[in-house]
Every structure is written in structure tokens, then in C-alpha cells.
Amino acid sequence: MAKTINFALTSNLSTTVTVNAPAYPEMRGESYPMVYGRTMGGGIKVADLGPGTATVYRNPSLAFDRLSNTQYENLRDFLKTHAKYSKNSFRYTDPFGTQHTNMHYTGGLEGFRSSVGNRWSGTITLAKDMSA
């Protein structure tokens, strides 16, 4: 039996979707609380937004391989209709039972591709809302 993960809308935990687990270990992805931009002259300006590099934002990527058409449609519809892409937070439970709360979808669904047998593969990126 394949391992699965669950996504549940934060505002209504009964709104859930279950799909086959992504490839693990997850690609952790981390970013520090700073922004940078380029000046008109080509220089780079950096603004540190936090008390130092002790705060790390989690933004994992989940790579799915060969989801059934039904699982792909359920995941797509959950992110589109319930999570409203990045607007609403959700919780996902990984195959090991760990719950990751206050997550937001940040992209990747448009990159999913189907293969022979109508199996879908692709990677979605999430970001944890650290203020919640």
C-alpha cells in the first residue's frame, strides 16, 4: 500500500484531500528574514527584517511522481477551490504522521505533466506562515 499525505484547510479541518506521498526526503527550502533589491545603478541593497539569522522561514517543495488522474484533480481542486491558491492556510500531514500547520501554496501546480496512463508528476512549493 502506497504511503499517503493529507491536506486539510485550516479554517475547516473537515475539508481534506489525500494523495500519494511525495518523494522523500522533502526538499526543505529555507529563507532568511531579509529582502534585497537592485538599485538603478546596478548595486544591491539588503534589508534585514529580523533579529538576525536565528529565524528561518520554511518553504518545502513536495515532488509527486505518478499521481492518478483522480488524485491530481483532488489536489488541484483543493488548492484552487479551498486554499484559493495562496490565500488560505492549510495543514498537511506527511507519511510519518507529522502535521505541518499554517502552510500556504506558493506555486508549481502549473508545471505538473501527465504521462502514459494519465499519471501526473510535478512539484509544488509551500511556505509556512510564521506569524500565525
Image (tube, helix red, strand yellow):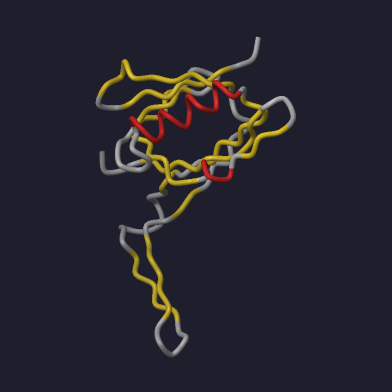
Percent across and percent down for residue 65 are 66, 31
- In the rendered view, tell whether residue 93 sits above or below residue 34: above
- In the rendered view, tell whether residue 37 sits above or below residue 56: below
Q: Which residue is drawn at 39% across and 19% down?
A: 16
Q: In which quarter of the image is residue 3?
A: top right
Q: State the residue in front, 70 or 37.
A: 70
Residue 24 in view: no
Q: In which quarter of the image is residue 84?
A: top left
Q: State the residue in front, 26 or 18.
A: 18
Q: How many marks?
A: 0
Q: Residue at x 39, y 35 (%)?
A: 80
Percent across and percent down for residue 56 are 42, 49
Percent across and percent down for residue 78 are 40, 28
Which quadrant of the figure contains the C terminus? top left
Q: Which residue is drawn at 56% across and 36% down?
A: 62
The reply, left or right, for residue 93 in relation to residue 68 is: left
Which quadrant of the figure contains the N terminus? top right
